[in-house]
Image: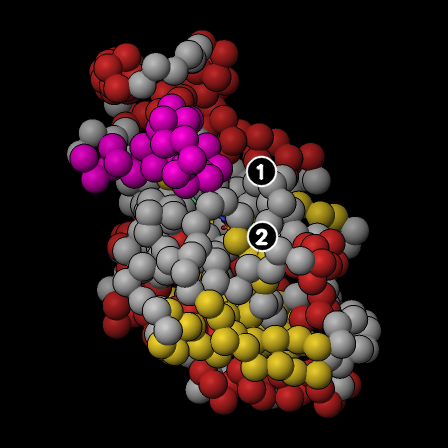
Amino acid sequence: MKVDVLLGLQWGDEGKGKIVDVLTPKYDIITRFQGGPNAGHTLEFNKIKHVLHTIPSGIFRDDKLNVIGNGVVIDPVIFKKEIEGIKAIGIDLSKNLFISKKAHLILPSHRILDAASEAAKGKSKIGSTLKGIGPTYMDKTGRNGLRVGDILTNFDEKYKALVEKHGEMLDKYFSFEYDLSEYEAEWFEGIKLLQEFQLIDSEQFLNDSLKNGKSILAEGAQGTLLDIDFGSYPFVTSSNTVCAGACTGLGIAPNKIGEVIGIFKAYCTRVGMGPFPTELFDEVGTELRVKGNEFGSTTGRERRCGWLDMVSLKYSIMINGVTQLTMMKSDVLDDFDTIKICTGYKLDGKEIDYVPYEMTADIKPVYTEFKGWKTDMTSMSNENEFPEAFKAYVDFIEKATGIAITVVSVGPNRSQTIERK
Ligand code: GDP
Ligand code: IMO
Ligand code: MG
């Protein structure tokens, strides 16, 4: 068996959580491979709306195993809150949630370092979710990090040594007021809870599962344009959000990857700082934000909105080896008279059709216009119901990318999902 990977092709919040939940019945195991509680994945079904941060979005389906892979970073405080929130809906996770011993821990002092670093950057800040992601991955690659498996051994000593080091860094490089004590107490409560879960060698478990005929879906967090190598650096997150990240974040060999499902919104959003060529600052941008309810699932921040960017979409498809596309939030465009897709960038007087080294603010989008379909699509359940103008929009994207759009989403609910033949 192979591992199918589902990942975002834009700047995150494409609707990954919803689609992973929809696809879960087809798989035995759902697993997260990178990122941490900077992610906010929203699921809606049976009048329940739930946002997940660290836990894979397969958790609400019976009899499925969910694995937090080695590439993920975990904040025990947020993890505990998530577990309690899911328990409150009557779901017991002790048997179907496994956690990699090699996943790294976000310490309270990582969060402080994140906040201090952002404050020191001033106007050039990243717009981080301030969950401690950057400093935790820095300690991972700097070979200083604490891993989940460490909580089974002489943990206190290792914890104290790392916090001391962080204290020295904060004193030396940042003038930043902080108090760890309150968060630290909650953090150790979270560590206790983590100890109750099955902490495993997940690379072994996942490869054995494949050998035994189990099917696996890997759930990306963030999006390709936030990837540490291929995103709009430095305005990115600190992990590899692309398909290759599923290999390193799970211990799966490249030849074990099956379908790569690339997911994108019918328009585009971004939260945080950094370039965004198709961003709209006018009433159209506001309309997209209001109709699409574009407010961050993790931080509540307003998401910046704009038209679909075909140049960066094609780039993301290339980097990930996408084999099928899923288009989300088509319904948000239901009322527009005219809809635009950016099909080229104008930079230094020349038109280009690729993502340049730096996605600077100087890029001017070149648009192709489409007639709006002016039809409420939210209760449609079959592609035969699609209005002609919508079909033309889908057709254009498929031709431009060379990849089939196999799923169209027309609302936030599980049921508002249309498979195409
Ligand atoms: P993720 O981080 O990729 O999982 O996406 P988020 O959950 O952060 O953001 C996607 C938002 O859009 C959530 O509020 C979803 O409930 C909502 N959503 C998902 N699909 C659709 C859709 O097809 N139409 C509409 N209107 N909302 C959707
Ligand atoms: P999901 O999985 C959208 C953005 C932040 C910031 C940058 C760095 O829900 O799609 P970080 O906290 O990682 O240091 O922030 O990345 N960002 C996201 N934007 N969706 C996310 O996750 C994001 N996770 C991080 O806004 O610009
Ligand atoms: Mg999100």
User: What amino acid type should be assigned to the residue bearing mark 2?
Assistant: Arg
Q: Which secondary structure lies at badge 1? A: loop
Q: Is residue 360 above or below residue 394?
A: above
Residue 158 to residue 136: above or below: above
Res. 23 in view: no
Q: Which residues are magenta?
A: 115-142
Whether residue 122 appears in magenta in the rendering, the answer is yes
Q: Tell me: 221 left or right of 349.
A: right
Residue 70 placement: quadrant = top left
Classify mark 1 as within 8 Å of ligand 2 or not, answering yes or no. Answer: yes
Q: Earlier in the sequence, mark 1 or mark 2?
A: 1
Q: Does residue 132 lie above or below 262 as drawn?
A: above
Q: Of the residues tagged 1 and 2, which is closer to the observer?
A: 2
Checking the image for residue 304, the label placed there is: 2
Residue appearing at x 39%, y 38% in the figure: 124
Mark 2 Cβ inside 8 Å of ligand 2: no
Which residue is tagged 1? 299
* Rendered image coloring scheme: secondary structure
Of 259 and 277, nearer the camera is: 277
- In percent of width and height, residue 252 lies at 28, 60
